[in-house]
Image (tube, rainbow, N blue to C red):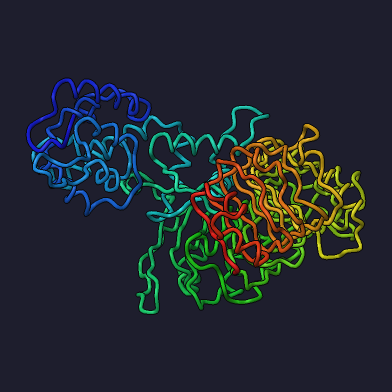
Amino acid sequence: MDGYIETGVITSEQVEDASNELHQHTHNTLGETSSEENVTALDFVQSAITRRNLEKRIEKVESYVGEVKQSPLLGVASKNALNDTANKNGSQIMPVRRVIAEKLQGTPTAAAIVAGVPGKNPDISSWKNTARIAFQRIYSKLNMDIKRCFDYCSIFPRRSKLRRVDLVCMWTGQRLVKTRCATEDMEDVADGYIEALVSHSFLQREGTCSDIDCFTIPDLVHDFLDEVIGSDYFRIENGMGQRRERWKGDVPRDVRHLFVHNYDAKLITEKIIGLENLRTLIIYVVERGTTVEKEVIENICDRLPKLRVLAVAFSQERYPIELPIEFCVPESISHLKRLCYLAFRTSYSCTVIVPSALAKLQRIQLLDFGDGKILEFTFSDLINLRHIFCGDMEFSNIGRMVALQMLPQFRVSNEQGYEINQLRDLNKLCGSLVIRGLENVNSKEEAVEANLAAKECLTHVTLSWGCDTRCSQEVGAEVLEGLCPPLGLESLAICNYRGLRYPDWMVGKQNGGPKDLKNLELECCFQPGPAPELGAFIHLRVLSLQSCSWDALSINIEYLASLQSLDIVNCPNIRSLPTLPQSLQEISIRRCNDAFLKSCERVGHPNWQKIEHVPTKKISKT
């Protein structure tokens, strides 16, 4: 249909086409609904949507719902009826599809609220009632275990960014996740719960945070959840800022899961310590300049022994703990014997002192110390630990921690407990892994013991040598040969490499290396002659070369037919460019030889000709 509908109703042909397509999207989410229980797909499309009444509805709904993402469902619902084109008079009419998607949470139910609520001027209570009926129907059909996990999310405030790993570890720690057989992994089941909630529009994807999937709960869904949860869950929405009023309410004595928006030592001491049934305590924000007192944390550990989840400065979007600079986890942490999730998210300027008593937390699955530095982590007995977050940490004797999935970095040294073979059995590692100190690996045989190829869930790997030049070039080459990453790796960085050659798995002379590598970074690599051939990485999209000694790029770079971005920084010996792939979309050449930089900008010069076809070029001395 051409243009917007300004008056009247949708034609029968458009009703049939749009209804059929919309039904495919809504069937799994809303199920078969009767006219008394909900608004069907046909009701949605047949509604008399005029420009004027739609604008009025949106104005009313706008005060009730918040900013949201685009929804494919809403696009389907409106594409035949409401096209974003100019009207017959040439003036631009409001792009209805976009406004609906932005204002109405992106859920099927929200679409029905705008287009399907009967009556000419439904008020906010009508929209709320329609939403409640629709959400109640979906909610009632959820698996009981999924429902309990979703109820748990009610303690978080609106628009909270929730990391997948946090939801999974909290749910499993609270024993809300049920497996069907002994061989089924509880985290895999919890991941399935998340996908089910996403498919029903109860959770929305919100990108990633440090390479971890994040989700939010749509406002309309959050309102519904607040209505149906029981007394086990409670939120204290105490304000922020110096002028905030102290929270004066009462916390139910039987509450099990408690959320406190803002750290307040007096509130914790007077209102929270002594809640004997408390299983979860999440303190969302610690304001800048606020000290988290050791005595308060000690009281929590002493007086709330049933805690399974304890988090301070939980928010991913607000400031972490900044004071004290030396943050001491108290010895009394060992009293929380049921603890599965512990987070003290500290600033990069903090040093975290972890007591030996932490080793007694045999159920712990996740430790999150934010960006703070831990001088030494010697808790190899924590065999159930799956995730650990920190800015910098020295790990020793981690070889027994076979459940570990997330490891910020591992530094190899000649000391006992820091050998590279400590990584051998940690085959559940996923996401990113940084291995430093590779100058302390003495042979290919030692490197092979890291068993990198078996760590199939890794997506990003960094291999880094130190500045110690005593490591022979031949040994360095053998070590890199033995560190063949898994097939599914997406990103690889190699730093301070001084070996004589590059490994067969990298230059395409043997099978076994990563086949679908998308990003490659080579930094401070020192070999005579040209840069290495990269025949193994035919799907490479991003190539970054920084502070390397080569005198030219590899001539086979033109065969990297998927390459889109090339970054050459501080490579003073390069004087000319080879033929570059036609796929290249951007090239950056910075801090290189002056004559080389000028030649890339001189019209007609061979170097200029090599990059003429690239849409985006940045040539700079800085």
Residue 394 in the image, given as x and y percentages of width and height: 77, 62
Can you tell which quarter of the image residue 4 is in?
A: top left
Where residue 326 appears, as percent x and y from the top left, is 66, 75
Quarter of the rendering containing residue 83: top left
Q: Is residue 215 left or right of residue 56?
A: right
**Residue depicted at 86% across the width and 42% down the height:** 448
Query: Front-most of 70 and 172?
Result: 70
Q: Is residue 364 visible?
A: no
Relative depth, front residue between 523 and 248? 523
At a point 46% along the width and 57% down the height, the residue shown is 258
Left or right placement of residue 168 versus residue 467 in this view: left
The answer to whether residue 463 of the structure is visible from this angle is yes
Q: Which residue is drawn at 37% across and 54% down?
A: 158
Q: In this view, does 66 lie to the left or right of 550?
A: left
Indicate left or right for 555 with 216 as reference: right
Quarter containing the N terminus:
top left
Q: In the picture, which quadrant includes the C terminus?
A: bottom right
- Relative to 34, is 149 above or below? below
The foreground one among 388 and 555 is: 555
Residue 250: percent from left, percent from top: 38, 64
Is 598 placed above or below 210 here?
below
Q: How many marks?
A: 0
Q: Extreme front residue here?
A: 604
Residue under the image location 91 percent in, 63 percent down: 470
Q: Where is residue 314 in the image (x, y as percent from the top left)?
A: 52, 60
